[in-house]
């Protein structure tokens, strides 16, 4: 007699190759529409499946976990960030949570570096001039941006992505500075040419570009608040490819409008897709629709990590990318 296959529910449309393989391996229910599930749909899915495969658009809180069925034993998140899942409550209820770390490192670092260049060289303004037909030809004083070689880059969060950003920025001649929960080993600092700042305030006040690369946790919510943003040089720019909640977006918008910060490059936003219209109206910002991990290769690799976690769990072993509360 064949063993019963795991019941897996996927909350969003995934690359076809990933969906096909999921169907081959498990008793998989795929999402027909490429829209987020409602809270009621998520709860209904959690009542009937062994494994839920959510994404960053699915908020799973304690009340929803309390309504989960007895068969739900693994939430195999499609993505590295898990701040949308109450991991501690899940573990208390005997539900494991896994993610897909490392897969998006290079792709997200590419976007961070692109935003640094785009904002300092005023690329969005240049694109707008060309697309509206307002450009009237080259002049010596038009569209003057800043040179990034020799500038001080501050990296907030020196994990996989932060280190990948550091490598790219160093290749462009930037001076690497960082603030992290824990200092890197001396040999890693030496390899990256990075200077550690124990005080985030002191680093923020001295850098020309600040790249946000830390996860969203209770301790990092509005880490870049109005007080800390005011420490930045008026000529400095800020780039965020991690989570929008790390920056007080209203305070940032006010300071950008007032010229107290020179520019911003944002791939993530505090309220998801509901972007402040005042922010969208600014010329000194480069805004992207959360494309940090949006490569075909990256999204397929994310799916492969999800399947490895599920298959390992199904074989009776600890998922390799198990998320442990308190170590996020």
Image (tube, rainbow, N blue to C red):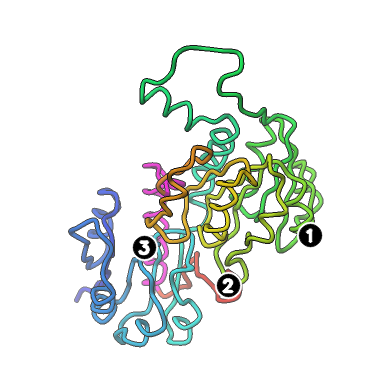
Magenta span = 290-315
Q: Which mark is residue 57?
A: 3
Contact check, label 3 and label 1, Cβ < 8 Å: no
Q: Quadrant of the N terminus?
A: bottom left
Q: Secondary structure at mark 2?
A: loop
Name the quadrant containing residue 225. bottom right
Q: Is residue 46 above or below residue 32?
A: below
Depth check, front residue: 267 or 184: 267
Residue 54 position by quadrant: bottom left
Whether residue 305 appears in magenta in the rendering, the answer is yes
What residue lies at 38% left-to-right and 71% top-to-bottom?
59
Q: Main secondary structure of the magenta part?
A: helix
- Residue displayed at 73% across by 44% down: 207
Crowding near pointer 3: few (<14 within 10 Å), some, many (20+)?
A: few
Among the two numbered marks 3 and 1 on one chain, the one whose residue lies closer to the N terminus? 3
Q: Given the current orientation, which residue lies at the most extreme front position?
A: 258
Given residues 184 and 35, the one toward you in this image is 35
Residue marked by disc 2 = 218
Q: Residues within 10 Å of mark 1 (few under 14, many from 20)?
A: few
Relative to 95, is 193 above or below? above
Residue 199 disc label: 1
227, above or below 88, in the image? above
Residue at image coords 37%, 79%: 73
Under circle 3, the secondary element is loop
Residue 75 placement (x, y as % from top left): 39, 72
Mark 3–mark 1 Cα distance, whole angstroms, equals 33 Å
Quadrant for the C terminus, please.
bottom right
Residue 118 x/y as whole percent: 54, 33
């Amino acid at each position: 007699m064949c063993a019963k296959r795991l019941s897996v529910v996927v909350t969003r449309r995934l690359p076809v190759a990933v969906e096909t393989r999921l169907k081959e391996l498990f008793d998989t229910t795929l999402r027909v529409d490429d829209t987020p599930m409602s809270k009621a749909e998520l709860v209904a899915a959690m009542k009937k499946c062994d494994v839920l495969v959510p994404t960053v658009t699915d908020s799973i809180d304690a009340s929803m976990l309390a309504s989960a069925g007895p068969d739900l034993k693994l939430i195999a998140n499609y993505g590295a960030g898990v701040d949308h899942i109450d991991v501690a409550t899940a573990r208390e209820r005997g539900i494991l949570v896994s993610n897909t770390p490392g897969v998006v490192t290079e792709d997200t670092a590419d976007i961070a570096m692109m935003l640094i260049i785009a904002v300092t060289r005023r690329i969005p303004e240049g694109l707008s001039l060309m697309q509206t037909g307002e450009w009237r030809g080259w002049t010596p004083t038009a569209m003057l941006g800043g040179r990034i070689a020799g500038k001080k880059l501050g990296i907030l969060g020196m994990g996989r992505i932060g280190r990948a950003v550091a490598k790219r920025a160093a290749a462009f001649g930037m001076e690497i500075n960082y603030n992290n929960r824990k200092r890197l080993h001396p040999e890693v600092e030496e390899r990256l040419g990075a200077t550690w700042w124990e005080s985030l305030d002191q680093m923020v006040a001295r850098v020309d570009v600040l790249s946000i690369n830390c996860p969203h946790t209770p301790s990092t919510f509005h880490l870049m608040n109005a007080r800390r943003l005011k420490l930045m040089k008026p000529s400095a720019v800020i780039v965020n490819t991690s989570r929008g909640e790390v920056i007080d977006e209203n305070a940032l918008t006010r300071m950008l409008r007032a010229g107290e910060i020179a520019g911003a490059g944002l791939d993530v936003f505090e309220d998801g897709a509901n972007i402040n219209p005042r922010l969208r109206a600014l010329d000194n910002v480069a805004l992207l629709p959360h494309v940090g991990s949006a490569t075909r290769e990256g999204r397929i690799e994310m799916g492969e990590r999800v399947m490895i976690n599920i298959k390992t769990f199904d074989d009776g072993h600890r998922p390799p990318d198990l998320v442990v509360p308190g170590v996020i």
